Amino acid sequence: MLFRERQQIAICVVAAAMVGGFVLLRYLPLRKRIEIVEQAKVERMLAVTKGQAQSKQLPVLEEQLLKLQHSIGNYQARIPQQRELGVFLRKIADLMNEHNLKEQVIAPAEEVEAEELNCIPVNIQCKGKLAQVFEFCRQLQALDRLVRVEQVKLTNDTDFGGEVTMETRTVVYYGAKISQEQGKVGT
């Protein structure tokens, strides 16, 4: 009987070693892989869900982009690559004459140079009816050249005849690359 008991103990030890070996060498590594795959599956599902949610916002973002592009217009096209200050000042004078504005003064100040854009401050002064001055300012902003109005000062005339004097400080821009290249050629 002792032999039979030893044989059963040996069988149990071998069976336990096989089960232990299976658990340690096969089941636990496969279980770990399954957990990694399940985690990756969850992460992919989250990414897909996030992508679907973002894709629903894409038409909204496209609409916003179109609105911004429309409001900005062709910004670069409104900045000439050459100074062309005389042409611009002539356009301002023509606009003032078109709106019958009196006591016209157009005085460019010292130009400011930068890396990509140069700017020229221009002080404008004129006198006329408020509607005329307003229309002049509206058309000034609509010119094909980018003009930034920094300051506008309107003053009633002393006899209250319905006319106002406008003093405006504007800035006009042009591309810096051309002017810098012209400076290099001249030296």
Image (tube, rainbow, N blue to C red):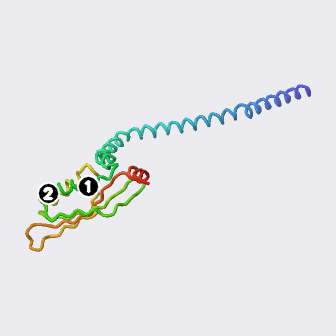
- Circle 1: element type: helix
Q: In which quarter of the view is residue 34 placed?
A: top right
Using the numbered discs, state the Cα–Cα distance from disc 1 to disc 2 in whole angstroms: 16 Å
Q: In which quarter of the view is residue 129 placed?
A: bottom left
- Furthest-front residue in this view: 187
- Circle 2: element type: helix
- For image coordinates 60% across by 34% down, the residue present is 37
Q: Which residue is disc 2 drawn over?
A: 97
Q: Residue 8's x, y, as percent?
A: 85, 27
**Badge 1 vs badge 2, beta-carbon distance below 8 Å:** no
* Count of marks placed on residues: 2
Q: Nearer the viewer, mark 1 or mark 2?
A: 1
Q: Nearer the viewer, residue 92 or 156?
A: 92
* Side of 71 where 155 appears, left or right: left
The earlier-in-sequence mark between 1 and 2 is: 1
- For image coordinates 13% across by 59% down, the residue present is 132
Dot 1: few (<14), some (14–19), or many (≥20) neighbours within 10 Å?
A: few
Mark 2: which amino acid?
Asn
Q: Residue 50's x, y, as percent?
A: 46, 40
Position above or below: 50 against 176:
above
Q: Which residue is disc 1 drawn over?
A: 86
Position above or below: 81 against 137:
above
Q: Residue 134's x, y, as percent?
A: 17, 59
Quadrant containing the C terminus in the rendered view? bottom left
Quadrant containing the N terminus in the rendered view? top right
- For image coordinates 17% across by 69% down, the residue present is 155
* Side of 114 where 13 appears, left or right: right
Mark 1: which amino acid?
Gly
Q: Nearer the viewer, residue 12 or 78?
A: 78
